[in-house]
Image: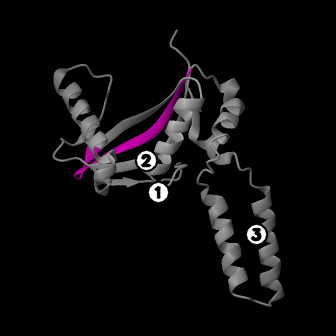
Amino acid sequence: MAEKYAILKLYYGLCQSDGLGEGRFFPAKKDEWSKARFTRALERMQYYLSPDRKWGLRAGGYYEDIVHNEEEAENLIEFAEKNIRGASGIIEPVSSGDGEIAFWRKIRFNSWVAEQKEELIWELKKSNYIPRYDKKDDLEGQIKTYKEANSDKECDKAWIQVLEKELGKLDPDTPWRRALNFF
């Protein structure tokens, strides 16, 4: 039986492909061409993840992303590797096309099972990292906009109350739960 594990998706990113052939990546393929292409993709991604080459990297913007950029991902990976058993940062190439490699930046947690989801979230929260939460950010932005307008209209005040009530109902662990999968 295969070992159980959890994956936390940090962000979906793009980097320059530097001439790598187009198409999806299939790490299970064992022919020499597929292995060489996969290895080259990993080398290209590592190259653009290095601090002095980040100009060739676009990170974030996808609904499931919980970090805004590679620096935040590196910090969370470093925390997890030091403080959570079985944690290791991974880069998973998805495809190459239009001059870019698409990939997922993730953390893998070996030997964690679905029944331990809340425990793992608790451990991740010890990092003091507040994950990106689009719905929360949207509500806070709307509230700020209405308040800055200094509107004295009763309907605007009522709308602000509705938005604040919705904001209060949000579970701060939702982004962690959404990004965490068990296999």
Left or right of residue 27, residue 145 in this image: right
Lower position in the chain sequence, tag 2 or tag 3: 2
Give the percent coordinates (x, y) of residue 76.
53, 42
Secondary structure beneath dot 2 equals: strand
- Identity of the residue drawn at 66% across and 34% down: 123
Q: Is residue 161 above or below residue 117?
A: below
Q: Is residue 158 above or below residue 5?
A: below
Magenta stretch in the rendered image: 96-110
Residue beneath disc 1:
61
Q: Residues within 10 Å of mark 2 (few under 14, many from 20)?
A: many
Residue beneath disc 3:
163
Lower position in the chain sequence, tag 1 or tag 2: 2
- Identity of the residue drawn at 81% across and 65% down: 165
- Identity of the residue drawn at 22% across and 52% down: 99
**Residue 133 belongs to magenta span:** no
Q: Amino acid at mark 1?
A: Gly
Left or right of residue 44, residue 73 in this image: right
How many labels sit on residues? 3
Q: Amino acid at mark 3?
A: Leu
Q: Residues within 10 Å of mark 3 (few under 14, many from 20)?
A: some
